[in-house]
Every structure is written in structure tokens, then in C-alpha cells.
Amino acid sequence: MILAWPWFALALVLPLLVRFGLPPHSTDQHNGTTLAHDGFPLLRAHAGQPLWRMALCWCALVLALCRPQWQEPPLVSYQSSRDLILAVDLSDSMRTQDMLDEGEQRDRLSAVRQQISQLIQARPGDRIALIVFADHAYLLSPLTQETQALLTLARELDFDLVGRTTALGEAILLARQHADPNRPTALLLVTDGRNTAGNADPLSEAKRAAASGMTLYTLGVGADPDTFAEALAPAQSDPSTELDEALLQQLAKMGHGRYFRARTQSDLDAINQTLDTLEPVATPHTHYRPNVELYPWPLALAWLLLSWPARLRSLRLRWRLPRGQAHD
């Protein structure tokens, strides 16, 4: 049991302060009579009541003012969820329009942006973080279950947001720094190039991430020359030559994950199915229940202490009177 307003307990000493703080007697200037001020209005209003009863009544009233409450124990439920960090390459090469979507060519970032949105929507109970990288890596959102906020950030991913080059090592380093050390975390590294910027070595960072318990998945974005709907210029005969597949495969192997190659929009769908195989972790969620108000009980006790003696005397008086006088 708790008291919502415990400071009202100070009122317990109020009768004593009035009793000993006021002058004991005063003279009525009209008729010269002496009046007593004992500081107990309840005693004066109910003369003849036992002192213990009036003291108990006052304590009950003060207790009601303190708002006693019964605090229900919280309910703990467990929800299975996964931790996933998405690291998306926003370098200049993501402008290349070589992703086929039902026969239509679209740029790489648009295809990745669409797939990320679908991935976020498909995992409402999972905690997801969003990292973008180019010249350097930046955290857009920490691990969160706020699906709508993540979808808004995913729709706002744009070219040249953080530069034009590719800092793979910094992206892995930043993901490791923001992972929950008490829960297994998966990192999905999405890129269409090779490590060309930053001060962090991708292989060293992948090794440290794996040692911390993180699973590393890599996704290489870029189509093959024979998948284009239209012929490319000779200078763009193979825009995926910058993709360092050997490095991405090695990173995934070190991180005990898997390497994906996305040549078309449909290739990206296999990623979500693989992430579903990750073992979810049961996370406790505490639900606090509203407190039960108990002030009516001391309030009812105070009312009984004040009213019951008078009623009891009235009943006794009725029984003592002759039957005929009781009906007059």
C-alpha cells in the first residue's frame, strides 16, 4: 500500500498545535463570560464523546486525505523480436539505372529504398536501426520499434546525402558501436562498390563485430550487362565492375552470415526470407496496472465514529420510553 499524498499526514498534529498554540481562555466582551478554546472542534461539536473515539476519527480523516492506494504488481510479458541494423550505401554510383523491375530499368537506390521499406513493414516487432554511409558513416536511427519513423527515414534516403565515395569499414564500426551488447544483432550491409574512404579497415571491423556476437550479411547491388532492357554505351558496358564481391563475400564469411547479389528487384526478396531464419530473442515488457483507491474505507470509518454513537443513544432512548409515548 502507498500514500499518493503523504504530506497530508502533517495534519495529524494540527489539533495539538491549535490546543497548545492558542490562549486557553478568552473573555466575551458583550457579557463578560469566559470561553474555552481547547483547539478540538470535533470534541466541542460532539461533547461527551470519548477522547479516543474522536482521536481515531481525526486519524481516519487524515488518512483519507493522504489517498491510500493499493499498488498492483506489474505484469511482465515477453515478446520475441530481433535486432537488425541496416547500413545503406548512398555513394554516387547508386544513381546507376541498372535494376530491372518487371522489365523497367530503375536506379539502384530506388530499388534498395523500396526493398528496405518492405523489410521494415514486414518486421513490426523487431528493433531496427538505420545507418547511411558514403564519405563517412552516420546513424540515422538507433535500434527502435517505431515502424512509421523508420519508413519515413527510408523514403528520404537520397543521393549525395553523405558524400560520393564508399566507407565500408566505418559503416561496420558504427553498427558495432550502436548494437545492444546483451542481444544478438544482425547487420545488413548494402553497397554497390568497394571500400574507397574512411579510416576503418572493413576486414578488421568485421572481425571485431563477429567477436561481439554480431552476424554480418552483405548485399552487392548491380546488374550484369546482359540484364539491361536497353543497350548501354561502351563506357558503361559493365557498371558493376566497381563492386568488390570478393571483399563482401569475405566479410559475410567472417561475420558468420551470407552474401547476396541483387541484380533485379526480385533478387532482393530473398533477403527478407533469410532474415526470418534469425533466432528471435524474448524481450520482457513491463505493464503497470492502475492503483486501487482505498480512501473510501477510512472515510467510512470516520463517518461511523461520528454518527453511530448518536444513533445508538437514540435507539436506547426509544426502547426505554413507554410504547405509547414512542408513537406520540
Image (cartoon, helix red, strand yellow):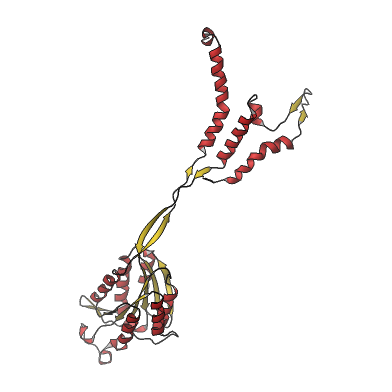
Image position of 131 with respect to 24: above or below: below
Q: Nearer the viewer, residue 149 or 119?
A: 119
Residue at x 39% of width, y 62% of height: 283
Image position of 320 with respect to 221: above or below: above
Residue at x 60% of width, y 43% of height: 8
Residue 62, visible in the rendered structure = yes
The answer to which image quadrant residue 320 occupies is top right
Q: Position of residue 23 (x, y in %)?
A: 76, 34
Residue 158, visible in the rendered structure = no
Q: Position of residue 308 (x, y in %)?
A: 55, 25
Q: Position of residue 162 (x, y in %)?
A: 42, 79
Q: Position of residue 34 (x, y in %)?
A: 77, 25
Residue at x 67% of width, y 36% of height: 15
Image position of 219 with respect to 303: above or below: below
Query: Residue 41 vs residue 165: left or right?
Result: right
**What residue occupies the far bottom of the structure in this picture?**
234
**What residue occupies the far top of the structure in this picture?**
324
**What residue occupies the far front of the structure in this picture?**
211
Query: Residue 265 vs residue 326: left or right?
Result: left
Residue at x 43% of width, y 79% of height: 173
